[in-house]
Image (spheres, grey):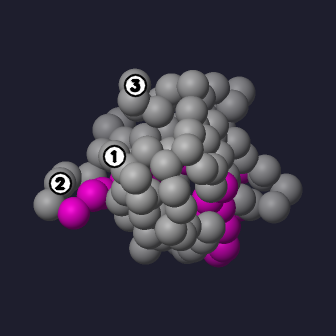
């Protein structure tokens, strides 16, 4: 079992930056692909960014490309999401996920709230 705990969310203004962290425990995430998702009020959860375990290949939702960066530190068992040039449309609860199996992910964190004011 893997436990995931997100942190780093908060209230910021448009144009600001935030770095989210996802700390894993229970098992090393070294051999898991990792991902970030978000869910805004009244909307379905959507994929934001992912990173493979094998070679660190990253992929992103189109609307965050060039603004968000996902990275992993296997020694710290932690994944990060650097979010730049935030806008109000980025307001959501951001969740970390581990171990992608097809289109599904096995482990999920509880999420951290990100609110971007105009």
The answer to if 40 sits in the magenta stretch is yes
Residue 5 lies in what quarter of the image? Answer: bottom right
Real-space Cα separation, disc 2 to disc 1, in angstroms: 12 Å
Within 10 Å of disc 3 (Cα), the crowding (few <14, some 14-19, many 20+) is: few
Residue at which label 1 appears: 89
Q: Residue at x 51, y 26 (%)?
A: 65
Q: Nearer the viewer, residue 108 or 38?
A: 38
Q: Is residue 71 above or below residue 74?
A: above
Within 10 Å of disc 2 (Cα), the crowding (few <14, some 14-19, many 20+) is: few
Q: Nearer the viewer, mark 1 or mark 3?
A: 1
Residue numbers of the magenta segment: 19-41
Q: Residue at x 85, y 56 (%)?
A: 75
Real-space Cα separation, disc 2 to disc 3, in angstroms: 17 Å
Left or right of 105? Residue 34 is right
Q: Nearer the viewer, residue 100 or 68?
A: 68
Task: Find residue 92 and report its horizontal and vertical position in percent.
Answer: 36, 59
Residue 27 lies in what quarter of the image? Answer: bottom right
Q: Residue at x 78, y 52 (%)?
A: 74
Real-space Cα separation, disc 1 to disc 3, in angstroms: 13 Å
Q: Is residue 72 above or below residue 76?
A: above
Find numbered disc 2 in the image and state the secondary structure of the residue it sits on.
loop
Residue 23 lies in what quarter of the image? Answer: bottom right
Residue at which label 3 appears: 62
Task: Find residue 21 and report its horizontal and vertical position in percent.
Answer: 65, 61
- Which numbered disc, 1 or 3, marks the residue that appears first in the sequence? 3
Whether residue 96 appears in this view of the structure is no
Find numbered disc 3 in the image and state the secondary structure of the residue it sits on.
helix
Within 10 Å of disc 1 (Cα), the crowding (few <14, some 14-19, many 20+) is: few
Residue at which label 2 appears: 43
Find numbered disc 1 in the image and state the secondary structure of the residue it sits on.
helix
Q: Point out the residue furthest to the front here.
A: 118
């Amino acid at each position: 079992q893997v436990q995931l705990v997100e942190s780093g969310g908060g209230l910021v203004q448009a144009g600001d930056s935030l770095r989210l962290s996802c700390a894993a425990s229970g098992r090393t995430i070294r051999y898991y692909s990792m991902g970030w998702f978000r869910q805004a009020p009244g909307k379905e959860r959507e994929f934001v960014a992912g990173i493979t375990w094998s070679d660190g290949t990253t992929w992103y939702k189109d609307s965050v490309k060039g603004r968000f960066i996902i990275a992993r530190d296997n020694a710290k068992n932690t994944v990060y999401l650097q979010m730049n040039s935030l806008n109000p449309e980025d307001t959501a609860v951001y969740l970390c996920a581990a171990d992608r199996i097809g289109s599904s992910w096995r482990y999920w964190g509880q999420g951290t709230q990100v609110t971007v004011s105009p």
